[in-house]
Image: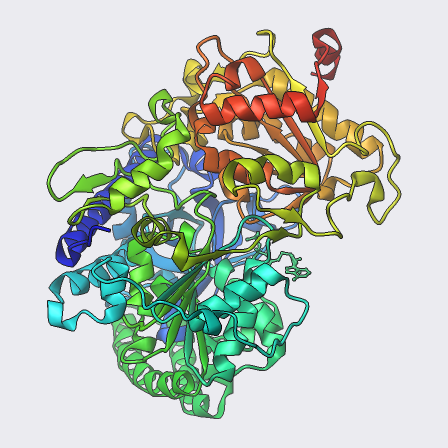
Amino acid sequence: MAPVDVPSFAAAQQTLLLAELEAELAETAALVAGHSPAALQRAGLAVTNLVVAGTRTGFGGKTLLELEPDAATSRSGVAELPEHGIRTGDILVVAEQPAGSAKKREVRELERKGARGVVTRVARRFIAVALDDEGEDGGGGESGGLAAGVGAGRVWLVKLADDVTYKRMNGTMQKLQKMSEAEHSIFIRVLFGQTIPTPVAAEADAGAVDWFDPTLNDSQKDAIRFALASREIALIHGPPGTGKTHTLIELILQLVKQNLRVLVCGPSNISVDNIVERLAPHQVPMVRLGHPARLLPSVLNHSLDVLTRTSEAGAIVKDVRADMDTKQASLRKARNSKERRAIYAELKILRKEYRERERRCVSSLVAASKVVLATCHGSGGFQLRGEEFDVVIIDEASQALEAQCWVPLLSAKKAVCAGDHLQLPPTIKSLNSSSSSSASKKKSSNSSTADDAKGEGDAAKQKEAAAGGAGRVSLETTLFDRLLALHGPSIKRMLTTQYRMHEKIMQFPSDELYESKLVAAEAVKARLLRDLTYPVEPNDDTTEPLIFIDTQGGDFPEKNEDDDETASAAGAAKKTSKSRLIGDSKSNEMEAALVRQHVRRLVESGVRPEDIAVVTPYNAQLAILAPLKDAFPGIELGSVDGFQGREKEAVIVSLVRSNPEGEVGFLGEKRRLNVAMTRPKRSLTVIGDSETVKKGSKFLTRWMSFLEDNADLRYPDVSLLALEA
Ligand SMILES: Nc1ncnc2c1ncn2[C@@H]1O[C@H](COP(=O)(O)OP(=O)(O)OP(=O)(O)O)[C@@H](O)[C@H]1O
């Protein structure tokens, strides 16, 4: 075990994080400069034709804008937002929409003219945005105060690089770098391999626990016992469908019973809300920091935002808020800019007072909570300054950047991380490997080149990353990976009973990735589509859980989007994840026709479209498949990466790649394939060219032969398919 030098590690992280931010900024800039607002909207980066429908004072005294579709532009008259990729927590700029097809936009220009903010709510008919601190003119830049902009012209919003999260991570790494050795707690020393974790006494590990949920399975109980007994670190490895969240809920309840104070974090709002929702029925005193992404009352009732308004302590905050709303409203009546400026000056004073009162209210609410929940970066906000926790729990830790995890960990004495390092890690956009001694670079997992397609050496790379000095530090190596490589499997417990997949669907991933340890729970191991709770005709498609439609033979060639001149992305944005949305992606029309055919057969057998999902690694293929949504309303189409964490009764995977060279790009990443093949409950249909795919890696060779031996193997009839297309 080679210890890691903390300052060098923190310094290398800062270099990488900066490169990542720069890559993201460059990507956004290139996309915005090179595409029309309509194209950006199609790519999920912008929403056009909006109007400001209302303004209010939100949490932190910030101005909240409610943006609705401009009724004048909606054909149906029903003002619903179009399909878009904007999510709660996204950072964006709201600006006046350029007339016609004005070209050459620059992000900086947009930011100067518009207002920056964070999305606080996404609904079908509106998007709410909390504007960043406004200057003298109300944050509306040259467009003259968007905050006052009810009834003003048409606006659009454009998603920006997330520099807020970057700043939190970078600040955390700076703190870590500056710490003297004397300040390193045992916890920190263990996490960097300078000392081994305190051994967990066998009797403590096996000790009696009074379970809140006695129906937990043995592997779940073992994991909880281990997490309770460990002194510094415990990893809970949760393969797909094994009840990782279920296990964490019991763990939190047990910790609270021991009168310990717990901070629970996850990389996304959804991961945190999921826990809040499931913890709520247990009546634990808890508070959720940040803007809850979900609207379920159970989540809202625990949100710090709502508590600040509704609790007794919140009453004094309310008065100021009312004053601010009145002032805000009076902006609209202002006759000239002088009057407007005067109102802004008053608002500024009120906002200061508001923050002061809010701060006091927040700290009393947080102090009274046994369990505090926030996203990893959200835990770095002012609300938790000076707060101490006995245990920090990080869910989905294998999907978080390590620097992100350190935001809560810096104040921890003990951590429990749950995740599955054999599913996809967080998305990285920059060329991202750095070393304190060499400047060697490695391609990110998202670039679809043949050379990183051999997904075989992952474990070796992880070991390498964790070895020696600061070692090779890469953003792709998560804390979960690094700790496993550093301390070995003794710091982890794996959950082994899965509650999702038919046994036959589970078998390959279990054998290949989870040491054949997965067991299908009795209730799911033999479930078929024909056993759904509604009538489904029993036939070849509904009684077979694993189908492989093999397109070998060269009749189903892939198409490179770059071949198509209309789809070429801006040069600078190439080889990055978002550019796949617009160009530089692969598709396969014949394969799409097979997907259509199979969906139709399932639906004709009685399977409801909402129980079917089609997933594929390529966005260009998704674009070709999009008409399925009209033909079969309710069906879900998604990228493999976007479908991580989800499940469906029937899943069709379109592999796309078919070429004589055996180039497989994205498919070479076995963690991506693992995610793709573990989404279904009752039916997995794989469509792909076995000849091409088996050349990609040893893992793919084994998968193809597994399917040949175990799946219901079908060879499509090209002439019949022509009719389908
Ligand atoms: N001990 C158990 N007995 C019966 N059902 C269980 C048990 N543990 C988990 N489940 C069920 O398994 C399903 C998956 O559980 P959960 O949502 O906690 O999984 P997860 O591991 O967080 O999800 P993912 O695997 O996608 O990360 C849920 O429907 C849950 O009710």
Q: Nearer the viewer, residue 35 or 359?
A: 359
Q: Classify residue 89 as left or right of residue 572.
A: right
Task: Give the colour scheme of this rendering.
Answer: rainbow
Q: From this viewpoint, is residue 56 visible? A: no
Percent across and percent down for residue 350 are 31, 82
Q: Nearer the viewer, residue 717 or 57?
A: 717
Percent across and percent down for residue 691 are 55, 13
Percent across and percent down for residue 557 are 55, 11
Q: Quadrant of ligand 1?
A: bottom right
Residue plotted at (77% across, 43% down): 526
The part of the image, by quadrant, that contains residue 189 is bottom left
The part of the image, by quadrant, that contains residue 179 is bottom left
Q: How many marks?
A: 0
Residue plotted at (55% across, 73% down): 300
Q: From this viewpoint, is residue 295 visible? A: yes
Percent across and percent down for residue 413 are 31, 73
Image quarter in which the C terminus is found: top right
